Amino acid sequence: MYYKKSRGVFDPQSKEPFKISRSKIELYTQCPRCFYMDVRLGLSRPSTPPYTLNSAVDNLLKNEFDLLRKKGEKHELMEKYAIDAIPFSHPDLPQWRGEVTAFEGALVMDEKSNLLINGLVDDVWQDSQGNLVMVDYKSTSSAKAPSLDDEWKQSYKRQIEVYQWIFRKLGFSVSKLGYFVFANAMKNLPKFDGKLEFEMSILPYEGNPDWVELTLLQIRELLNSDIIPAPAHECEYCAYKQQSVQIVKFLKEKQQLSLPG
C-alpha cells in the first residue's frame, strides 16, 4: 500500500543537520522533482521488490573477503587482476556496511550544506601505499562481459565517487582508483541442479568526486525552496504521472460531454 511518509522529510524551519543518503543524492542527479517530492514533501517513488538474490551474492562475497581480511591476504581475483591491495581491516567496517545501525553506514557531516551524508559500502580495500580503495559488488546475468559503458551504469560511477568523498571527509587517504567486483550468473548451462554458477571479474574505475560538494549545496538550496522543480526530461516516473493525469482529465471531460443535457 502506498502512503505518504513522515520520517526523513526535510523541515525548512529546522536548524539541525539533515541526513541525506548516497541513494538520495543519486535520486537528485536523476530527477530533482522526484527528489523534492520524496525528501521535501514525503511522496516517494513507488517501491520495487527487494533484490534478494543480489543481496545473497553480496553477503557471500563479504564472507569470502572477510576470511582473507583476517589473514591479511589477497583474494584470488585480486591476484588474477594484479591489484595492489588487500581487504582493509578496521573496527568500523561493520558500521560502514550498515551491520551495526541499519541503513546508516559511513556517516560524515558537510558543514557548508549542513547535511549529514551517509553511504553503505560493500567493501574497502587498502593498497600498498596505505590508501583506501572503495569497492562495490555487482550481480548481473548477461551474455556480454560486464562493462561500465552503458548509460544507466553511470550511476555506478557516481556511487563509488560519493564513497570516495565520504571517506576523505572521514580523514582517510583514499585512492582515485575504485573497483567493481562483478558476479555474472551463467544462464546457458545445460542443467540447473539447484544452483547458480557465476563468472567473476573485476573492473577498475578512476573516480573524481569533485562534483559532490557543489551538488550538496544545490540540494540544500532546493530543499529550502517552496518551488517544485521541473521534472527531468528522461524521468519515466514523471512522464508517467504527467501522461496519466492528462488521460484521466481527457476521459472525464469526454464523459461530461456525453451526458444528456
Image (cartoon, grey):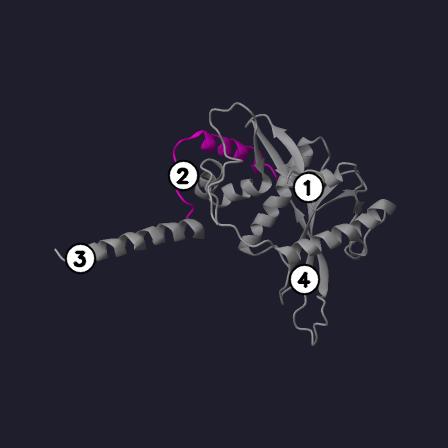
Circle 3 packing at 10 Å, graded few (<14), some (14-19), many (20+), is few
Q: Please rate how many residues cluster around mark 1, counting C-alpha atoms within 10 Å: few if below 14, some from 14 to 19, many from 20.
A: some
Tell me the number on the disc at residue 184.
4
Alpha-carbon distance for marks 1 and 3? 59 Å
Sequence-wise, which precedes: disc 2 or disc 3? 2
Q: Position of residue 217 (x, y in %)?
A: 52, 31
Q: Which of marks 1 and 3 is in front?
A: 3
230 drawn magenta: yes
Q: In this view, does 18 lie to the left or right of 43?
A: right
Give the class, few, some or many, for how many residues have Cα within 10 Å of label 2's Cα (few <14, many ≥20): some
Residue 98's disc is 1
Question: Magenta residues, as a range?
Answer: 209-233
Q: Can residue 151 be seen in this view?
A: yes
Q: Distance between the residues labelled 2 and 1?
A: 32 Å
Quadrant where the C terminus lies?
bottom left
User: How far apart are the alpha carbons under marks 4 and 1?
Assistant: 25 Å
Q: Which of marks 1 and 3 is nearer the N terminus?
A: 1
Q: In this view, does 91 lie above or below 111?
A: below
In this rendering, the answer to whether 184 lies above or below 232 is below
Q: Which mark is residue 229?
A: 2
Residue 234 showing in the rendered view: no
